[in-house]
Amino acid sequence: MSVEWRVAKVGYFKINQIFHGAIAQFGDNDSSVLFNRTIALQRAIPDFFGDETRFAAYPIFFLPLRELVGGPEGTIVSRSETGDIRVGAIHALSVTASSLIRIGSAREIVAESRVKHIRQYNDRTGL
């Protein structure tokens, strides 16, 4: 990538929430690595005696990632007359789960998010 490091000038920037391995970044950088893993457990009747909160109990957390297939390779050439990145305003409600909001560019972005949702409801016939 043939981009010189630039300065980001932003008039207004507001994010209501940023969490769970997310990044808000201004300007150019070499790389960003984002990682998030989550177990979301919801039960109608609480039970705190199982081992459902161990990541090792679920293959989704340790299986190898699939490789992306297809798509042409590309080269990006960028030129800025002023040398700066200028943005008027950004308002984001939320940035979460290994996501990235960036004003600028990077050579490499690696992001991984693995989520296991478990929902256990009561059997209506047994109530």
Image (tube, helix red, strand yellow):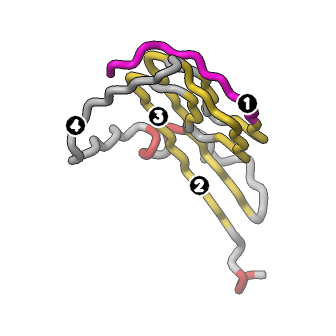
Specify start and end residues of the magenta stretch as a single range. 1-13
* Residue indicated by mark 2: 117
Residue at image position (49%, 17%) is 29
Measure how far apart labels 2 and 4 are at the Cα level: 35 Å
**Could you tell me residue 123's position as x and y percent?**
68, 78
At label 4, which amino acid type do we have?
Glu
Which quadrant does the C terminus fall into?
A: bottom right
Disc 1 residue type (three-letter): Gly
In this figure, which residue is indicated by the disc labeled 1? 11
Residue for point 34% across, 40% down: 65
Q: Which residue is mark 3?
A: 111
Question: Is 122 part of what is drawn in magenta?
Answer: no
Q: Amino acid at mark 3?
A: Ala
Residue, x 56% and y 35% (percent of image)?
100
Tag shown at residue 73: 4
Viewed as shown, does residue 2 lie left or right of 14?
A: left
Residue placed most toward the observer, 124 or 4: 4
Mark closer to the observer (4, 3) = 4
SS type, badge 1: strand
